[in-house]
Amino acid sequence: MTSPRKTYIIANWKMNFTPGEASLYLSRLMKRIPAGRNPQVVLAAPTVALQTVSLQIDRRQFKLAAQNFYWRDYGAFTGETSISQIRGFVDYALVGHSERRYIFNESQEDIAKKVAAALRNGVTPVLCIGETALERKDGETAAAIYNQLASGLHEVSKEDISKVIIAYEPVWAISSNKNAKPAKPADIEKAQMVIRQDLQHIYGKAIAEAVPILYGGSVSSDTAAGYLEIEGIDGLLIGGASLIGDSFCAIVETAKRIKNER
Ligand code: PGA
């Protein structure tokens, strides 16, 4: 059955690349990734490189995402960047990534405000959620998912939820985690169903169906297919493997084959 939702492959370059390095890497990707809307390829470049790469990309081939921003639009907030300052460069913005939650102590309240700020500025928020290893061990995965989802979407109306993307990233599977281990597709299938049910509970069945759910956490060119074959998974958020041209291009190819075959 063909999914009514688009497929997304999002590269999270994290705190890697100077503007010059990002530009060089992008020029290599531009030669290898065909333009097209399925999958939609999105590059979350570091803030410092967004202007450079936005002048370089063909928007039919790539869209850009912010990795982070402050939720107020302007004002006396030394060192911060607002989404209204960078919305000319990006169509998407990551919000609530586990590295922001656990390294920079971002609160659920901050995350809800960022989701609202992105929507207010015409940018699609990619709300990242996922349980920690401890929550998983304690059998609290579903509770952690519901909690992060409900609080992150606290300010999102029924009209706006179709403009949001959810990325399920169990913290224990993200490569920056010391003891990271790749998740099994069966775990992801279960979690994806929990997320879809939670969305239905909050917004109603028909509206919830429109929201894309992505998976992220140690995805490589070898494991991508296993996740993309899951019926309710609409794409991937990729960290480490997105910095290696061969791996990233192979993942985009895999997504194209699997999601367009259906
Ligand atoms: P990883 O990162 O693919 O390196 O695990 C994913 C992420 O942090 O979004």
Image (cartoon, rainbow, N blue to C red):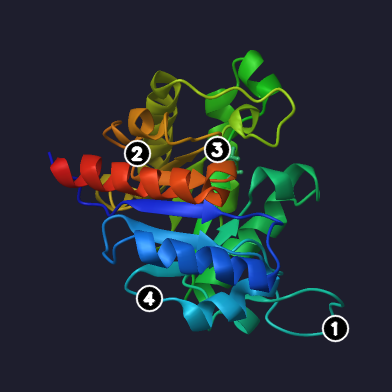
Q: Is residue 158 visible?
A: no
CA gap, disc 4 and disc 1 = 33 Å
The residue tagged with tag 3: helix, strand or loop? Answer: loop
Judge from the rendering whether residue 95 lies leftward or rightward of residue 162; answer left or right.
Answer: right
Front disc: 4 or 2: 4
Q: Amino acid at mark 1?
A: Ala
Image coordinates for residue 74, horizontal then vertical, percent:
73, 84
CA gap, disc 3 and disc 2 = 12 Å
Judge from the rendering whether residue 100 lies leftward or rightward of residue 242; answer left or right.
Answer: right
Q: What is the quadrant of residue 201 in the picture?
A: top left
Q: Which of the two residues, 8 or 207, is positioned nearer the viewer here? A: 8
Q: Is residue 84 visible?
A: yes
Q: Which of the two residues, 256 or 88, is positioned nearer the viewer here? A: 256
Instruction: Give the crowd class for mark 3: few <14, some 14-19, many >=20 residues within 10 Å.
Output: many
Instruction: Tell whether circle 3 marks a residue whose Cβ is less than 8 angstroms from ligand 1.
Output: yes
Q: Amino acid at mark 3?
A: Glu
The residue tagged with tag 1: helix, strand or loop? Answer: loop
The residue tagged with tag 4: helix, strand or loop? Answer: loop
Residue 169's label in the rendered image is: 3
Question: Residue shown at 29%/67% (left/top)?
Answer: 35
Q: Quadrant of ligand 1?
A: top right
Q: Earlier in the sequence, mark 3 or mark 4?
A: 4
- In this view, 260 is above or below 119: above
Question: Residue shown at 26%/57% (left/top)?
Answer: 38
**Label 3 close to label 2 by CB (< 8 Å):** no
**Label 3 close to label 4 by CB (< 8 Å):** no
In the picture of the structure, the residue carrying the numbered disc 4 is: 59
In the picture of the structure, the residue carrying the numbered disc 1 is: 76
In the picture of the structure, the residue carrying the numbered disc 2 is: 233
Front disc: 1 or 2: 2
